[in-house]
Image (cartoon, grey):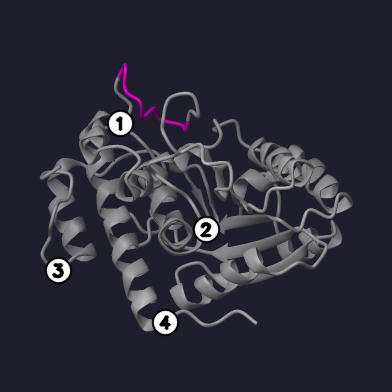
Amino acid sequence: MTEPASTDDIRSVAEKAMRLRTLVLEMTTLAGSGHPGPSLSAADVIAVLYFHLMRHRPEEPGWPERDRFILSKGHAAPALYAALTLSGYFPAAELRTLRRIGSRLPGFPDMTLTPGVEASSGSLGQGLSFGIGVALAARVTGRDYHTFVMVGDGECNAGQIWEAAINAATWNLDTLTVIVDRNDHERETSGSLPYGPMEPMADKWEAFGWDTHEVDGHDLPALLAELTDARDSRTGRPKVIIARTVRGKGTRHVADNPEYHMRPLPPELLDAAIAELNPAGERYLERA
């Protein structure tokens, strides 16, 4: 049975999630572009993975036994870059170069450029197929790592997601976990997704043969428990965790506001937004 996370563990992950959100707002506003809303909805899950659960070595990004994280919803790259820099993969000052020509931090993850990025993504629907290949490689080579793939709920409109899902179940890939960032938004829309109803999403994954769970994607104790159990249990089925989240979580300027899917906060709103995240209103990128 998985041991519950300690109070210190939860406090530590919460502090990291706050830093991720602050850095996301800072770097996207500085770049004048990017996707703050879907980055903020994913921040708690990414914080749990990078700062509590996954085995990885920033000083050795290619360590063969590392757990893998694939951000299939690649437009949330700012949250991934913030996690990588706080882990030590590259200096925080590089976040200032987000989306600049010649930068190692493009608008969407590129595994050929950025230390710690496991897969190039951004063409929605393809990350799960890639993750299945990574999980199969562990089986073939006899390695004990776990593969996590984050997809968006809107991304689940892509047919390739379901083609991949049925194959992962056929191959009994129980070292593979998908996290669905279920924020109920798609691009600049809100509420019902425009390309068709997603409900009952859990029943759909279950019907495709997956071990299916749902969780509040901002409830850190619940997230810690679900993700730890997903990594440690062997059920003979791939696992999916549907994480219900709020796009733009953490600041009222962005939360559930369709305008901030792929538009940064204007500089004049940045201080107020950061003050909602940390009481001191500290900007971490300023001192990097």
For this view, does 220 lie left or right of residue 97?
A: right
Instruction: Note whether 14 is above or below 64 in the view shown.
Output: below
Q: Name the kind of residue labelled 3 in the image.
A: Pro
User: What residue did someone put label 3 on?
Assistant: 279
Q: Secondary structure at mark 1?
A: loop
Q: Residue 106, image x and y in percent?
A: 39, 27
Q: Amino acid at mark 4?
A: Ser
Q: Which residue is mark 2?
A: 183
> Which region shows up in magenta?
101-109
Q: Residue drawn 41% across and 49% down?
A: 39
Q: Are marks 3 and 1 in contact (CB under 8 Å)?
A: no
Q: Are marks 4 and 1 in contact (CB under 8 Å)?
A: no
Give the main secondary structure, helix, strand or loop, of the magenta stretch. Answer: loop
Of labels 1 and 2, earlier in sequence is 1
Kindly check if marks 1 and 2 are in contact, taking CB atoms under 8 A apart as contact: no
Residue 6, label in figure: 4
- Give the percent coordinates (x, y) of residue 234: 76, 67
- Where is residue 184 shown, x and y percent of the image? 55, 57
N-terminal label among 3 and 1? 1
Q: Distance from label 4 to label 2 (Cα)?
A: 27 Å
How far is the residue under mark 1 from the one under mark 2? 24 Å
Q: Quadrant of the C terminus?
A: top left
Q: Residues within 10 Å of mark 3 (few under 14, many from 20)?
A: few
